Image (tube, coloured by chain):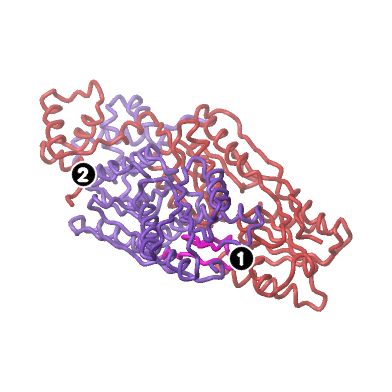
Chain colours: A purple, B red
Amino acid sequence: MKKRVSLKDIAKEAGVSIATVSYVLSKQNNTGISREVTERIKRIAAELNYRPNQIAKSLQSGKSHTIGLIVADISNPFFALIARIVEDEAKKHGYTVIFGSSDEKASKSADLIKFLLNRQVDGFIIAPAEGSKDQIEYLKAQNVPLVLIDRYFPKLETNYVVIENYLASFEATGRLLANGNNRIGMVAYATEMQHMQERIRGYRDALAQDGISDTFVHEIKFSAIQSEVEGAVDQMLNMNDPVDAIFFATNTLGIIGLKYLNRLKVSIPKDVSVIVFDESEAFDFFYCPLTYVKQPLHDMAKKAVEVLVEQIADPNKGFHKIKLGAKLVLGDSCA
Amino acid sequence: MKKRVSLKDIAKEAGVSIATVSYVLSKQNNTGISREVTERIKRIAAELNYRPNQIAKSLQSGKSHTIGLIVADISNPFFALIARIVEDEAKKHGYTVIFGSSDEKASKSADLIKFLLNRQVDGFIIAPAEGSKDQIEYLKAQNVPLVLIDRYFPKLETNYVVIENYLASFEATGRLLANGNNRIGMVAYATEMQHMQERIRGYRDALAQDGISDTFVHEIKFSAIQSEVEGAVDQMLNMNDPVDAIFFATNTLGIIGLKYLNRLKVSIPKDVSVIVFDESEAFDFFYCPLTYVKQPLHDMAKKAVEVLVEQIADPNKGFHKIKLGAKLVLGDSCA
């Protein structure tokens, strides 16, 4: 394969500056460049089979009709599904979506934002990773339209579309209590991110309201999910007075936990009650229909696209701060 | 929010052409532009809070250290996982990955390729949609490094990393035959794409080799997967002489089929044997451990990145045509 032809190659061949080539090939009027030079450049570009580039144009119009979507982990069905819905909704508005996945790392998120920003996406939908607050502040300072999804930074004025994590968690824990459980463990992530902290707070407040002071929160590191979830389950089941219920704070934590409970031959709900925050295709095959918190994924993704498209069209609009309710779907997994 | 500052704004303010601004701000030496004008442009750009743009640089160097990955459907765990592994592997080589999802539509794939190409990705990894052959040919003609993954076009000379679909399907069908089944149905997609046709051919040849002429292939349209899979299952079970085994050609088809068999209270493997091409997290919760074709996802994604990075570094290298073996994992789902 041959090397790709660059503006530099054409400039060299034509004996003019790269800027002149760029100017001529981006087809501006009134360039002040002579007709003779203009035609020479065009001829050489054609001879060298130069691929015309839309970048110069979008640099000027500022519109690429493309949205950058950055999720925390594309291999998580929760985000893969959000990506798919954002794609479908964006298409209705005439936008193409380009994704990146930050792997919950601020450094990776920074690389993606930089690339997409420099490639002139019209705006961003971002499920921010921990530690990426300054990146969002930077985008704001640069007047780049953006909507946060699933997570947000409470002290930062931005558009966001999230769910009522505190209320959903409070309700789920309340359900475990109402069904007679009173030693309830929680498996969550170790992160300062507000959505997770709200889920933990909802759990604690529900217990406190029932006068229960024994809380068992296990915070799992992203870097060692499987071993830490299994360790947490072991610990909760092997206490002198073991838990009678476990609340898993995400689908990933839930699936790993349920697989491990299966391996331990712990029967749900006979031996222990379970609620999972979030749903999963896998739950459909679980022997006991699960009680789980159903997030309004479709509404969340749809709203995020609508808010973004609106802001791209009218950058002076105020911020949309949207919190959607989640629904507790009752199965048979909490006795 | 304020409008983003463009080169045009700066040019207007400085009373010079856009090309001159672009040239100055991309920090070229020997621009032939006077020191006075250069400094005026820089001062105005700073005053207007202009965001420096890397595009001009990558236009010249031709390297963005970014790979474009286009999959068929990001909400399918098969592709979400490939995306995640490509991401991890690319990172090891210093590349960022930007994804797009074609939704199995050639038109959407064309939009994504156009956007990413114009934004100077260094190369592509593509799981091509049906009807996108001319897009791949175009990229080839433009000397853009690319690797096809999961699917390829047999008559097109390109890099590809796929699996031995024919052999894997032949082996899976052979297993159903060896276990005493002889009325075996197959649920596949209606597509001309070679990977699916090879799976169907493997099934047919395995039956033919055993002297069985009754084949039952149901080809499902992407636009109506659920209803057509259920219809196919109904038809196969309600024949005068019903099937004794069903071979699902992908994980999506398998999950929908298994859910439906559950609803019908058809017991596996007692009432019907099942093999699925591909794995799924959901299978871990199915009451009967499944026999399935395990694709070497990790190897496939890793190889694709290696081949692409190699071609970016040395565009004159010959094509890599890699077919990896798949493994039949034996569960208890075929009697």
Quarter of the rendering occupied by the C terminus of chain A: bottom right
Subunit ID for the residue under disc 2: A
Q: Amino acid at mark 2?
A: Ala
Residue ranking furthest to the front: A240
| Residue A136: percent from left, percent from top | 28, 45
Residue positioned most to the top:
B30
Q: Nearer the viewer, residue B89 or B114?
A: B89
For mark 1, what is the residue? A270
The residue drawn where x is 46% and y is 56% is A249
Give the chain letter at badge 1: A
Helix, strand or loop for disc 2: helix
Residue pointed to by mark 2? A141
Would residue B177 appear left or right of A304 to someone viewing this image? right
Camera-side residue: A269 or A161?
A269
Which region shows up in magenta? A273-296
User: How packed is label 2: few (under 14 Cα within 10 Å), some, or many (20 or more)?
Assistant: few
Reply above or below: B161 against A207: above
